[in-house]
Amino acid sequence: MLSFMRTTTRLSHLSLALPVIGWAILFSMIWSSAFVAGKIGLRYTDPYTLLTARFLLAAVLLLFVCLPTMKKHIFSDRTLLRDALLLGALNNALYLGLTFTSLRYISPELVVVVVSCAPFLTSIIAGVLGVERIGVRIVAGIVIGFCGVLVIALARPIGTLDPTGVGLAFLGTASFAAATVFYRNRAALHSPQQVNFWQSAIAMVLLMPLALYQNAQGAATLPSLPLTAVVAYLAIVVTIGGMWMWLYLIRRSGATTASTYHLANPFCGLLLSYLVLGSEFKLTDLIGIAIIVLGLFIVTRSTSGARSESKKHQSNTPSN
């Protein structure tokens, strides 16, 4: 457990050295792998039991990470508890509950495509609420990047276009987009580890009744080595590692720009399939990747330019 805490501390130091695009690519690889692992886990249990076990393990591990500061902050900070409650409901219970349930109706590839709509929803929510200014170039970059996603997705069989599955995935994505904007606007001052602990614990509490109901209605979930491996991977790599990266990227890049990194998810999913499963890599994949990279370049350049202008304006503003 001590080594686990040291590893988390090293991640915090590495965040200062590794370029944001490096974190974005690593995050996208981890995030995309969750749907593949989830599909495997659903062979052995229902989505709510899988997610409840995942968040239980993640919360226990994160509790030890937060122990050094828990007397000062984690249980006494009402603002943290309130913000984490909403994030846990949006980020974990609704987003993952709905998208994992959609895997019962549609393929993981189609789920990834729907989730790739997150930048559009995030930019709309952020713009309407006035959290961030969304310029024409950023919108153009998002549209171009999503065209690259479609080039990759439409060249492959994505299974049955079930309305229920697509609807569940879209509602989950909308919940995720809302959580992204909320974290940027309200909760960015909190420790990412503490936020992650609470939203994992809250999601576990919210999903547990559904898991108990599913097990009562059907066959009870029996522990197995593959299921244990999937739960451990989802809890440690995705919930702890991936969510920490996601919260860090929102703080560093902003809600809209950070959500744009999800456009790389289809490519990362294909790359993982190619490396692990030996799946085919097509010419259209390379074309789609090039289009996605162009879109990401436009968005990141626009964001960095706006940030530089803001700093320049602040430096030229006389102090009172």
Image (spheres, rainbow, N blue to C red):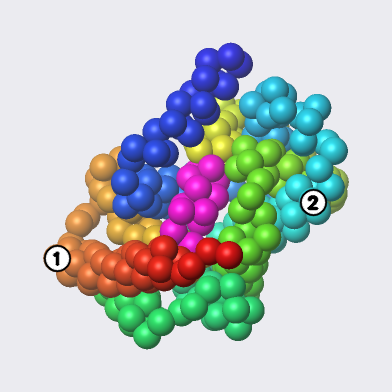
Q: Main secondary structure of the magenta part?
A: helix
The residue depicted at 66 percent of the width and 46 percent of the height is: 190
Cα separation, mark 1 vs mark 2, equals 50 Å
Q: Is residue 130 left or right of residue 258?
A: right
Mark 2: amino acid: Thr
Q: How many marks?
A: 2
Stretch of the chain drawn in magenta? 242-254
Query: Does residue 24 appear to the left or right of 1 in the view shown?
Result: left
Report crowding for label 1: few under 14, some 14 to 19, many 20 or more residues within 10 A (C-alpha). Answer: few
Q: Assign the N terminus to one quadrant of the image.
A: top right
Q: Which residue is mark 1?
A: 283
Magenta stretch holds residue 248: yes
Residue 55: image x %, image y %?
A: 68, 40
Report helix, strand or loop for mark 2.
helix
Q: Amino acid at mark 1?
A: Leu
User: Residue 100: x and y, percent?
Assistant: 60, 56
Q: Is residue 83 left or right of residue 112?
A: right
Q: Which residue is mark 2?
A: 79
> Residue 240: x and y, percent?
56, 37
